[in-house]
Amino acid sequence: MKSISEYLEEDRIKWSTRPYLTVKNGTWQTRTFRQVIDQIQDLSRGLLLHGFQNKNIMIFSENSYEWILLYLGIMGYVGTCVPVDKDWTPYDLNHTLSVLDTAAVFYSRSRSGCIDSLQEHYPDTAWFCIEDSLESLMEAGHRSGPALAGRTDLTETALILFTSGTTNLPKAIPLTQENLFANWETLYRRTPMTAADRSFVFLPLHHVYTCVANVLYTIVSGMELWLNSGFLFLIPELIEARPTVVCTVPLILYRMKEAMTEELLKTLRAVRWLYCGGSFTDPAVKEYFIQNDISLLEAYGTTETSSVIALSVLGDPNTASNGVVFENLDVRIDCPDEEGIGEIVVRGKSVSKGYLHRNDRYSEFDTDGAYHTGDLGILDERGHLYLKGRKKRMILTANGKNIYVEELEALLLEDPRIKTAKVYEESFHPAAFITANLPEADVQALLESINQKLPPFKQIRTIHIRPDTEGGRIK
């Protein structure tokens, strides 16, 4: 196992003039491995000139070429990368910055409205608009940057991801380079990605699923990386790119099925590895793609395990399972009932060492370093994993977003007029039942106030009211 910097140094020589990263700016523009890696290294030198060595650096931006430069540069040469959801609100960002010492925040111009209200509260944090600052940082690094030494200690934290930003104690997941690369050999044996492949990326890069499988593994395999310019253009750009490797989520599969044409079908049949993860896939939809000769492989994983835990095997007649567990992981079912259903527990080199600053009841890592996923399942003798629901109270949306209901309930209960609150899933979105004596106008005002603090996917769509006949808050 090599480090990110070692892979980059090797790629710069081995694949110097081969096309690597293609983005659309009116027309498709392609840069070679050498061009991209030169810019990664210049940017890294620029960051080191600012004193960010071994510091936490946040990326708050939509997908972009610059996002990838920052991601690989920070982890490879500078410090710890902290990418967050572009849809986060100032409320989310404030809670995250309050628990994580962050030396710098790189944000896109489109996110500046969120940033403006935070800067004065964090005077020790440096703030960089990507469009206004990255070019000058690369120029400074190119002209007079220090000698560049890669971060080669694979056990140091390279990446911190957040499963949520809503409460005062967001769940920060540290991942090392060892964690991030641990599953590569097993994944390669199942689905060998090579320099002949082309990956097409449209999922948010801050998700571990995307930033590992779609970005990090390109520097190991040498495959090309094409970046979608936006969901509105997903299908036409997919057809233009003609990829052989694609990571998707069930929601996109459903939309592709609805929009299927002969041209799209032909494009999908040429994809060698079409991974689908992040949420449960409707078995009927899965069968539709497989029966149409599309190499759909269902994946199951978590951020805490650096993504994949189980992956379907191409040609396996067992399409009822949600994948076959990776051979390099120790996966067991904890406390199974009479039907064999219990909590899925994972141990292995891809598993995080545990949440930062979270030594409380939310910690799901045991003393042996195993992660208790909170998901229920059955594991058969051949390693097929069958998901059977969730132990923890969480809404998992069709586009792979996790919504922890306790966080939304806590926001509702901040209003002393509400006695009880229960959040649940209704028509694929959060809804709530509350016990309170409130007029409808006050409930709507409360809903608007809470939703202003939340990114769109977490916003509560409906509040149902039960009259409080007893009065007072339940302790």
Image: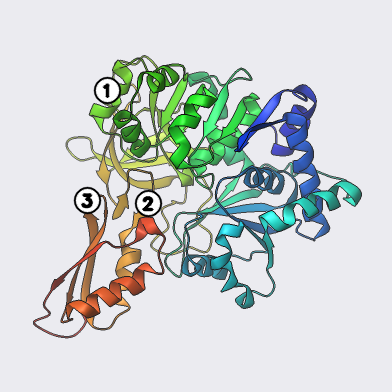
Q: Is residue 220 above or below residue 178?
A: above
Question: Total label count?
Answer: 3
Give the residue displayed 64% in from the left and 48% down from the top.
158
Q: Is residue 347 visible?
A: no
Question: Can you give x and y, in whole percent of width and height, for residue 211 in the image?
Answer: 55, 41
Mark 3 in CB contact with mark 1 (< 8 angstroms): no
How far, Cα to Cα, is label 2 from label 3? Answer: 16 Å
Vertical order, 383 against 209 (above or below): above
Check residue 427 in the rendering and tell me which mark sits there, or answer none: 3
Instruction: Determine the CA span between mark 3 and mark 1.
Output: 24 Å
In the picture of the structure, the residue carrying the numbered disc 1 is 287
Residue at the disc numbered 2: 402
Q: Amino acid at mark 1?
A: Glu
Q: Amino acid at mark 2?
A: Asn
At mark 2, the secondary structure is strand
Q: Helix or strand or loop: what does disc 3 sit on?
A: loop
Circle 1: element type: helix
The residue under the point 67% across, 29% down is: 20
